[in-house]
Structures are given as structure tokens and as C-alpha cells.
Amino acid sequence: MTIIRNIPLPLTETDIIRRLEMRESPHIRERIVTIIRELMQHQNDYLKPAVAYEIYPREAITSEYLKLESGRIKGRSLSAILSEAAEMAAVACTIGNSLEQTVEAYFRSGDSLKGLLLDGMGSAAVDILAREAGRVIQQEVSARGYDISGPLSPGMHGWNIKQLPNLLRLTPANQIGISLTIAGMLQPRKSVVMLLGIGHQLCQWDQVESCESCNLKQTCRHRVR
């Protein structure tokens, strides 16, 4: 089990604007950009990044499920994508509750614009945190001559979102404050759980390709194109 806190997040204005679906606008109001810059100056108050992961040897993989020493995960896409993996990393990432609480406070006070922009910062920060988690794990496994695959999460094509609890149980998520609500949503909301294959010559993909494989790609407002 590995726990990492306070990972530096190279967050940019462009990342936040993309998350707010403002990136295609030819003219972004000066007030919005000003607020984003102000929020970024205080991002350490809002963002409490933490990553927790466990690496497992792969025991078996079939067309229907992946078996690790601590559990079994169903998913038709897993066997095709991870068939060459020798190990798996079950990873949980979160930026904590502080940002969500501040967003809610802004909305309660009537400052919905600042709340919306801060929420966009949180979404962008989780994206970057997941990427940085992959970079850390890649550095760890490269010492053994391995590479990592692109990230997989329940909800992507061939992996039912109902498998989220099974994947979450394989991670040390409780060590960094992540849990599931009764409705099956991650708490804190600005969190992500993913599976990485570890081995030789594994498939890699970027965020655009991940979005293309997601079952929610037609409706997700955060889809990367």
C-alpha cells in the first residue's frame, strides 16, 4: 500500500476553462479570467491532493473478469486491454472536501459565478492528479523494467459502472478519506478510482481516447474532444 499526499498539480487557466466548456469561446469575459486567476492564487487552500494505491499480481483473466489476489472484477474490456499485464495497480485519487465545501458556501451566499469557476478548478485538478498518479506509478515500476497501461475506470466501454465498489475495495481509498455514498457515488465528489495494467508493451491512450471509450461520451459536459 502506498499513500502520497500534497502532490504538486501543474494546474493552468486552460485546464479550468476546458472543464467549464469555455475553451471554444472566441471571447472570454475579462471578469471570468480575473476570478479564475484569483482562485488559482489560493489553490493550496482548496486543493488537498492525495493518492492511494495497491499493486497486485495478476492471477487470472478471462473474457468476463479479472482476478487478483484480493478480489475479482467483472468487465469484458479488461481481458482485451490488459491481457499482457503481469500486475495491476488499483488507484484512488482525491483533492479532498475543502473545495466542495467552499463551492457550496459561494452558492449559498449568492456568488454562483465564483462557485461555478471553483468547481471547474476542482474537476481540472482531479484530471491532473490522476495523470500525476500514473506518472508516479510509472517511475516505481520502471525500476523493474515495466511500463503502465492507460487508465481504466468503471463506466468506460465494456466495464459497467456497477463495478466501482469492487474496484474501490481493492484500493486503500479509506486511508485518504474516499468512500461511496448510498447512491453509489464517490465521496468526496472530486475523486477518481482507476486501474492501471503493469507489464511490457501495454496499450497507452490519452484523455481524448478515454472519453471516446466512455459510455457517457454523448452527454458528459466534460468530454475532451
Image (cartoon, helix red, strand yellow):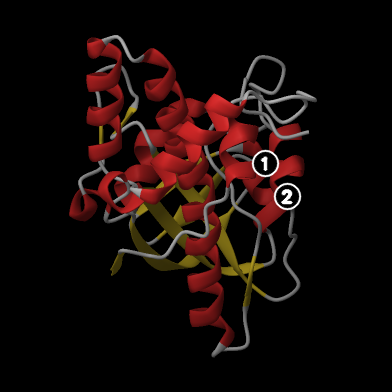
Q: Position of residue 187 (x, y in %)?
A: 28, 32
- The residue positioned 38% from the left and 36% from the top of the image is 190
Q: Are marks 2 and 1 in contact (CB under 8 Å)?
A: yes
- The residue wearing badge 2 is 80
Which class describes the residues within 10 Å of circle 1: few (<14), some (14-19), or many (20+)? some
Judge left or right: residue 122 versus residue 158: left
State the SS at label 2. helix
Q: Measured along the vertical axis of the image, is residue 135 above or below residue 12? A: below
Disc 2 residue type? Answer: Ala
- The residue positioned 42% from the left and 35% from the top of the image is 164
Q: Is residue 97 visible?
A: no
Rendered image quadrant of residue 148: bottom right
State the SS at label 1. helix
- The residue wearing badge 1 is 77
> What's the CA distance linking mark 2 and mark 1?
6 Å
Q: Is residue 29 visible?
A: yes
Q: Nearer the viewer, residue 216 or 18?
A: 18
Disc 1 residue type? Answer: Ser
